[in-house]
Image (cartoon, rainbow, N blue to C red):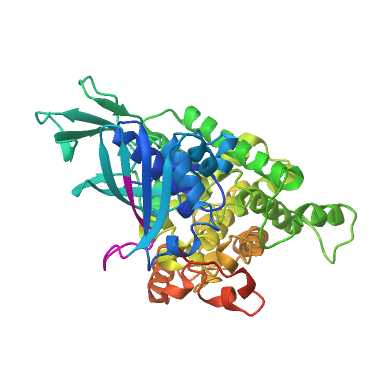
Amino acid sequence: MKLSILNHVIGPVIRGPSSSHTGASYFIGKLARALLSDDLLEARIIFDVKGSYARVYRQEASDLAFVAGLLGLDLADERFKRSIELAEELGIRVEFSLSDLGEGAHPNEVVIEMRGRERELVARARSIGGGMFEFLELNGSPVKLTGEEYIYLVEGREPEGASHSFESGGRRIWIVKSAEPLPIESERVIEPVFLPMKGEEIFSSGSEVERFCEREGISLGEAGLRYEAELLGMSEGDVLRMMIERYRIMKRAIEEGLRGELSLKVLKPSASTILRKLERGELAVGGPHTKAAALSMAVMHACNSNALVVAAPTGGASGTIPGVSVTLEEEFGLSEEEIARSLFAAGVAGLIIGKRATFAAEEAGCQVEIGAAGAMASAMVVEAFNGSCRQALDAAAISLQNIVGMVCDPVGGFLEVPCHTRNAIAASSAFVNADLIIGGYENPIPFDETVDAIYSVGKMMAWELRCTAMGGLAICPSAMKFKPKMG
């Protein structure tokens, strides 16, 4: 599976709080509505009774996201936050229910039954981490749709290049997928959800990128920029400008978290208070590490209030990298372009985690979400201070080595406790990890092997410790008052 830095690692842009449960849910709903090719009258959204959706879909705004997607709302549309109410106003009936979706169902599997004026469509899909998703079936026929291509729906005779087909309204509909627009007649053309990947990956592991950097005499960030330009079939300048825009979205999320109207369910917003005390010298230690921590919490305030954030690599981990990035700009004088180039180093570290493991806490715990963000941020700091490719990867490796086995245990199913402080600590420790490596610590376990180890540990975790709010801190006596209700 190809992975793009902008599509899957530092992105996509989503509404918080969760990339798996909010971001991907919106994308699934939007594509499902487009595949229906009809006016939507009613929809039934079914979650697996054993899965993560069943326990947290209300707490993590999956319900709002699915309906916003089904209504075709733009991500920037503030009506996202009242999408269920809006559906009622439009006369569209939406129902949520739980069922047994089968022994092999993914923790984030969903079935959407839709009825239009003339057509009906049953779509089976799953969220697979970091905003990524897959459609598995349409009206019982197997498909593979990931939102990374143009989709042409062609009725009747099988067209050249068709990959799948399904029955709809007594007619056979063929699917043609392409990374580029095609000159074919079709009933409907569905635009890509993500940036189409037209080229090839130039590396896929830490060892490969190290050799690439050594051969080319470049840094990890420069390697990431070249990778993304080649994969997307775009110029390096265009790709760099897109990363700068991602960084600006991160900064706006910080601003919203510090000044906006916030709707946290468990915590009282504290980022602005911490920053004020930092500025007045009223904290125990202070310094850039603490600033990065507080700024990361501001993003999490915004994320948990359904604001626009950059999944980096997930919604629950979206605070770490912005906190580090803005600290690098404000405390160390880096320009937006320098930040963007450093973000590509973070992107490569995340890319390798995504290739060798996953970004889904439902599969491997918080170590592959906030843990991944901390590793990415550590590589980014090394890049910002002109460290080598090897040093950046080693900083990412020791970051992961420090959190092996970290479970995902959101109190009440909300991504607030312990997610806020975990993002803060990941942001703060990125500077320490960079200093240790640049200062001379020799990491004995390479990044690739470290990633493999955390994935192995993740697969050993009990399901209660993987984003179900059924274990860890989520079942402490003080946390039980926030326990989510099923159904």
Image location (x, y in percent) of residue 413: 55, 64
Q: Residue 149 occupies which quadrant of the picture?
A: top left
In this rendering, the answer to whether 340 lies above or below 389 is above
Residue sitting farthest toward the left: 157
Q: Which residue is rendered at x = 62% and y = 47% of the image?
A: 384
202 in magenta: no
Q: Which residue is rendered at x = 31% and y = 40% of the image?
A: 115
Closer to us: 486 or 241: 486
The reply to whether residue 219 is in sight is: no
Image location (x, y in percent) of residue 7: 43, 42
The reply to whether residue 445 is in sight is: yes
* Type of secondary structure dominating the magenta stretch: loop
Image location (x, y in percent) of residue 78: 60, 36
Closer to us: 292 or 213: 292
Q: Which residue is rendered at x = 57% and y = 36% of the image?
A: 79
Residue sitting farthest toward the bottom: 477
Closer to us: 297 or 156: 156
Q: Which residue is rendered at x = 44% and y = 69% of the image?
A: 454
Closer to us: 307 or 83: 83
Q: Residue 342 occupies which quadrant of the picture?
A: top right
Q: Quadrant of the C terminus?
A: bottom left
- Magenta segment, which residues? 100-113
Image location (x, y in percent) of residue 352: 41, 55
In this rendering, the answer to whether 123 lies above or below 432 is above
In this rendering, the answer to whether 437 lies above or below 158 is below
